[in-house]
C-alpha cells in the first residue's frame, strides 16, 4: 500500500481549523471525482508519479472506497524520467491492482511521428503521445492534478475544461462554472480535462500529504545528487543529454519540488528530509514551484497558455 | 499561499470547534471565498495586487515578471495591477474578462478570491464569481461615488444571496481624505442596499494605490477607526445557514464493490455530498422523486464511519432497506421534504450567445439529475440597475436576467434557491452541443430579496410561494 486508506489516519487527535480547511478541500475534490464517475464512460487519471497526481489517486480511492477505482491511469513517459519515480509508479500500480497505460515518447520518436528537439527537452513532446493515447483508448474524461495557484494562466482554468478533437483549449469555449454544478457534455471526439485539485495550494497539498501520511518518491526529500547548473537551476546529470562540456557537475544536497522530464526539471538546494521540514521550507520560500523548477515555463510569460492551446496538460 | 514566517500553523491555529455547528449561527471557517467588483479604473486590480503584495503573498518570480513588464512599459514603480492579470488577449486589451481565482493566506485565514469583471456585458462572469462567494468587495471611486454600476453590482450580489458586502471607497487620497465625501457615499449606498435584503454591509475608506487601510490601518484617515480591508476579511463571521436547513443529499454514485470487498460483498452505499442540513445514523429519510422512506444505518467515509455529516461533507450513506436508488435521486429529511414538480419558475441568466426562447427544448441539470426541459414563458426581465421588472420580452439574451417558467420531463424535487447554491441552483444545457445556455436559481429571486428586506430571515417562506406545483 502506498497510502493509508485503511489506517484511519490522524482523525483521533483534536480537530483544528486547518483540518476543517483540508476537509473542505478533500470533500470538494471527492465530489468532483464522483461527478466524473457518474457522467463519463471512460475516465482516466494522468499519473506521472508526481505528488499532485499521487494526491488525485489518493482522493479517488477514498471517493469510491470500498469499491475498486473506476478509473484507469495513463502516464506519458518521456524516457527521461527519474528511476525513483518510475519504480514508485510501478509499486503503486501493483499494490493497488490498478490499470496503467504508458505512452512512451520514445515510440513516437522511433517511428518518426515526433523528432527530438535540438535542446534535448522532451517535455513539449508529450502533447502528441498524450492526445494519440486519449483518442486510441477512447478516454472521454482526463483527470489531471493541475492547480490554479501554479501559474498565472491556470488561474482562469475551469474544473471541467473542454478540449476539442485536437486537444486544443479555447478560452472562449469554456463554460461558466457556477456553484458546484459541472457540465461535462461534449461532442464525440472531444474530451473534458478535469482538475479536482484546482482550489488547492502547494502548501495545502503538503499539509494534506502529512495528515494522510501519503508516501512519495524519495526525490521529493533532501538527498545528495550529482547536478550541474543551467538556466538558474540544478539539473541532474544523465543520459538525457546533460551536462554539456561547458557545464560542471557538482555534488549537492537537493530535493525536487516537482518531478518531470529530467532535462527541464530542476532541483533546489534543500535540507528538508521529511514532509514536516518541506512544509517549513515552503512557508519560508519566495519562489513559486513552477518558477523554481521548470525551465520550459521561463520561455515566456505566455508560454503555458500557448501550450494549453495545443493540448498540453 | 501563505509565506508568512509562521512555521507552526498546524498546531497553533485556534481550535475550530464551531466549524460544524448544528445551529446555523455565524461560524468562522478557515476559508473565506470572496469576489471583487468595480467599474473599470476604480482600482480593483490595484487593490487586489496590493492585498497580495502587502500580505506577502506574491512570490518573487511573479513579482519579477511584473517588474519586467513595468520597466518595459517605461514605468519607474511596479504596477501592482500586473500581479493579477491573466490571459494574453486580456493583457493586450488591458481589461479582465474572465474569472480568475487567486489563493492567499495570512496566519489568521485562507482566502480564495474570484477576480471577476463586472461590466454589464460580462454579467455571466460576475455571476460565476459571486455564485460561491461569502463576501463581495464593491469598489467605488471616491470622486464619483455610487454610480449605476455600483447599484448593479450590489443587486447581482443580492440576487445570488451573497451574505456580506464590503464597500471600499477607493482613491480617498484624491478627495483629500475627506470624511464628508465618505459619509455621503456610504449613506447613498446604504439607502440603496436597504432594499436588497443583504444581511451585512461594511464600508471602508481606502487608497489602493498608497495602501491606506488595505492591509494596515492608515494614519492619514484619523476620522476612521474601523478595520482595514484585510483585517475585516480575516475576522468577518460569515452567516452559514446551510447546516440548519433540512437535509438534502443528491446521490452522485452508487458504490457496489461486490467481490472486491471481501468484508461485505453485499455492500451498497450511496455516495454524495451533503448539500444542506445534517445526516446521522438513525435518521428517517425519503428518496425522491419516488417517495420511498427508509432509515440511515451508516454515514461512511474511507477513514471509517462518522457519527454525522453536515453541509459540504462528501460521505457515503448506508440505508436500512434495499430500495432502487440511482444517481440523480435526492435523499431528503422526512420533515420539509420538497414536493417533486414538473413545472416551476426560476430566475435565469443567459450565459451564451444563443438566446433562450419560449418553446425551446433543452436539458436541465439540477443537483445530480439531468432531465429534458421545455422553456416556457418569460415572465419578465429584470432591470438590474433599478430592480424593476420589464415585461414583454420575447427571449432571454446573453447576460439578461429574467424570471422564466420551466417544464421538465421528469418531476424534480426542487427547493427555492439558497445562498451559494446549496440548493435550488440549475443549469440549462443545449442538447446539441453541450453548451451551458443559462444558469438559474429556483424561484423569483427578486421577490425573495425585496421581501427579505421587509421581513428579514423569512425569505424562505416567501420564496416557497413562488414555486408552482406541477399539474
Ligand atoms: N490616486 C489613486 N489612484 C488609484 C488608486 N487606486 C487605483 N488608482 C489608479 O487608477 C487606475 C486604474 O486602476 P486599476 O487597478 O487598473 O483599475 P481596475 O480597472 O478597476 O482594475 C490606475 O492608474 C491606478 O494607478 C488610489 O487609491 N488612488
Image: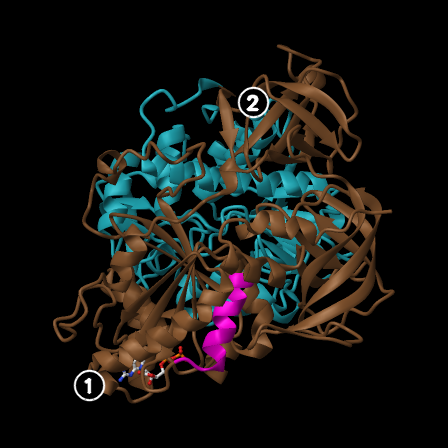
Chain colours: A cyan, B brown
Q: Quadrant of ligand 1?
A: bottom left
The picture quadrant where one finds residue A245 is bottom left
Q: Position of residue B181 (x, y in %)?
A: 27, 82
Residue B149 drawn in magenta: yes
Q: Residue furthest front?
A: B454
Task: Examine the rendering and report whether any part of residue A309 can be seen.
Answer: yes
Q: Is mark 2 within 8 Å of ligand 1?
A: no
Residue A288 image position (x, y, % from top left): 33, 57
Q: Residue at x 62, y 24 (%)?
A: B317
Residue B107, image x and y in percent?
24, 48
Relative horizontal placement of residue B382, taking residue A313 as reference (left or right): right
Stretch in magenta: B146-159
What residue sits right under mark 2 in the picture?
B299
Q: What residue is pinned by disc 1?
A: B176
Residue B101 in the figure: left or right of residue B180: right
> How much space separates mark 2 and mark 1, taking CA atoms?
60 Å
Badge 2 and badge 1 in a common chain: yes
Using the rendered image of the protein, determine whether residue A301 is visible from the camera's viewpoint.
no
Above or below, comparing residue B358 to residue B199 in the picture: below
Q: Quadrant of residue B191?
A: bottom left
Q: Nearer the viewer, residue B328 or B393?
A: B393
Measured as percent of width and height from the top left, residue B384 is found at 58, 74
Q: Nearer the viewer, residue A153 or A95?
A: A153
The foreground one among B229 and B194 is: B194
**Residue at image point 74% right, 75% down:** B391
Chief SS of the magenta region: helix
Amino acid at each position: 500500500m502506498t497510502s493509508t486508506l485503511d489506517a484511519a489516519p490522524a482523525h483521533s487527535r483534536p480537530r483544528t481549523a486547518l483540518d476543517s480547511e483540508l476537509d473542505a478541500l478533500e470533500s470538494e475534490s471527492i465530489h468532483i471525482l464522483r461527478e466524473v464517475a457518474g457522467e463519463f464512460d471512460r475516465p482516466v487519471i494522468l499519473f506521472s508519479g508526481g505528488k499532485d497526481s499521487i494526491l488525485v489517486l489518493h482522493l479517488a480511492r477514498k471517493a469510491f472506497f470500498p469499491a475498486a477505482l473506476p478509473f484507469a491511469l495513463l502516464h506519458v513517459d518521456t524516457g527521461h524520467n527519474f528511476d525513483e519515480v518510475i519504480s514508485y509508479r510501478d509499486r503503486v500500480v501493483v499494490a493497488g491492482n490498478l490499470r496503467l497505460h504508458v505512452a512512451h515518447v520514445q515510440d513516437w520518436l522511433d517511428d518518426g511521428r515526433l523528432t527530438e528537439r535540438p535542446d534535448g527537452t522532451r517535455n513539449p513532446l508529450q502533447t502528441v503521445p498524450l492526445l494519440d493515447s486519449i483518442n486510441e483508448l477512447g478516454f472521454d474524461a482526463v483527470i489531471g492534478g493541475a492547480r490554479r495557484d501554479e501559474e498565472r494562466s491556470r488561474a482562469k482554468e475551469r474544473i471541467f475544461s473542454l478540449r476539442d478533437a485536437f486537444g486544443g483549449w479555447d478560452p472562449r469555449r469554456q463554460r461558466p462554472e457556477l456553484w458546484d454544478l459541472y457540465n461535462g457534455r461534449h461532442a464525440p471526439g472531444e474530451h473534458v480535462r478535469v482538475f479536482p485539485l484546482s482550489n488547492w495550494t502547494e502548501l495545502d497539498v503538503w499539509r494534506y500529504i502529512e495528515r494522510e501520511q501519503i508516501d512519495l518518491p524519495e526525490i521529493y526529500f533532501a538527498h545528495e545528487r550529482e547536478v550541474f547548473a543551467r538556466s538558474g537551476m540544478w539539473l541532474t546529470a544523465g543520459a538525457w543529454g546533460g551536462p554539456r562540456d561547458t557545464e560542471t557537475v557538482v555534488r549537492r544536497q537537493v530535493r525536487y519540488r516537482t518531478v518531470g522530464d529530467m532535462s527541464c526539471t530542476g532541483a533546489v538546494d534543500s535540507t528538508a528530509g521529511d514532509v514536516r521540514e518541506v512544509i517549513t521550507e515552503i512557508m519560508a520560500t519566495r519562489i513559486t514551484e513552477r518558477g523554481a523548477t521548470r525551465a520550459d515555463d521561463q520561455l515566456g510569460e505566455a508560454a503555458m497558455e500557448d501550450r494549453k492551446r495545443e493540448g498540453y496538460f | 499561499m501563505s509565506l508568512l514566517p509562521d512555521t507552526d500553523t498546524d498546531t497553533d491555529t485556534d481550535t475550530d470547534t464551531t466549524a460544524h455547528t448544528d445551529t446555523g449561527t455565524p461560524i468562522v471557517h478557515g476559508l473565506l471565498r470572496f469576489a471583487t467588483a468595480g467599474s473599470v479604473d476604480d482600482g480593483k486590480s490595484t487593490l487586489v495586487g496590493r492585498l497580495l503584495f502587502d500580505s506577502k503573498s506574491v512570490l518573487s518570480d511573479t513579482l519579477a515578471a511584473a517588474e519586467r513588464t513595468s520597466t518595459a512599459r517605461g514605468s519607474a514603480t511596479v504596477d501592482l495591477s500586473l500581479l493579477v492579470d491573466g490571459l494574453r488577449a486580456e493583457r493586450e486589451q488591458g481589461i479582465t474578462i474572465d474569472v480568475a481565482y487567486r489563493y492567499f493566506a495570512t496566519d489568521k485565514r485562507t482566502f480564495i478570491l474570484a477576480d471577476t469583471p463586472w461590466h454589464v456585458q460580462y454579467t455571466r462572469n460576475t455571476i460565476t464569481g459571486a455564485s460561491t462567494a461569502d463576501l463581495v468587495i464593491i469598489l467605488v471611486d471616491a470622486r464619483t461615488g455610487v454610480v449605476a454600476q455600483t447599484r448593479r453590482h450590489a443587486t447581482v450580489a443580492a440576487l445570488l444571496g451573497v451574505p456580506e458586502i464590503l464597500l471600499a471607497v477607493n482613491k480617498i487620497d484624491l478627495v483629500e481624505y475627506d470624511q464628508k465625501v465618505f459619509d455621503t457615499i456610504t449613506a447613498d449606498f446604504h439607502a440603496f442596499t436597504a432594499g436588497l435584503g443583504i444581511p451585512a454591509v461594511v464600508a471602508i475608506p481606502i487608497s489602493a494605490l498608497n495602501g491606506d487601510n488595505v492591509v494596515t490601518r492608515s494614519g492619514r484617515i484619523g476620522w476612521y477607526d474601523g478595520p482595514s480591508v484585510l483585517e475585516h476579511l480575516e475576522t468577518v463571521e460569515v452567516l452559514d445557514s446551510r447546516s440548519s436547513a433540512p437535509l438534502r443529499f443528491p446521490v452522485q454514485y452508487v458504490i457496489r464493490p461486490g467481490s472486491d470487498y471481501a468484508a461485505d460483498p453485499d455492500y451498497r452505499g450511496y455516495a454524495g455530498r451533503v448539500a444542506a442540513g445534517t445526516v446521522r445514523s438513525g435518521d428517517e429519510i425519503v428518496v425522491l422523486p419516488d417517495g420511498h422512506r427508509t432509515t440511515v444505518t451508516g454515514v461512511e467515509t474511507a477513514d471509517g464511519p462518522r457519527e454525522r455529516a453536515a453541509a459540504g461533507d462528501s460521505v457515503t450513506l448506508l440505508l436500512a432497506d434495499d430500495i432502487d436508488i440511482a444517481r440523480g435521486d435526492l435523499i431528503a429529511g422526512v420533515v420539509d421534504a420538497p414536493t417533486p414538480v414538473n413545472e416551476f419558475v426560476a430566475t435565469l441568466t443567459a450565459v451564451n450567445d444563443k438566446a433562450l426562447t419560449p418553446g425551446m427544448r433543452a436539458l436541465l441539470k439540477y443537483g445530480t439529475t439531468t432531465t429534458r426541459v421545455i422553456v416556457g414563458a418569460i415572465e419578465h426581465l429584470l432591470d438590474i440597475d433599478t430592480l424593476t421588472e420589464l415585461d414583454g420580452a420575447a427571449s432571454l439574451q446573453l447576460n439578461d436576467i429574467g424570471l422564466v417558467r420551466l417544464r421538465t420531463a421528469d418531476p424534480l424535487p426542487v427547493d427555492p434557491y439558497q445562498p451559494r447554491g446549496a440548493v435550488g441552483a440549475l443549469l440549462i444545457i443545449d442538447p446539441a452541443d453541450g453548451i451551458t445556455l443559462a444558469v438559474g436559481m429556483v424561484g423569483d429571486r427578486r421577490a425573495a430579496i425585496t421581501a427579505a428586506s421587509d421581513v428579514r430571515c423569512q425569505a424562505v417562506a416567501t420564496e416557497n410561494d413562488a414555486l408552482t406545483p406541477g399539474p
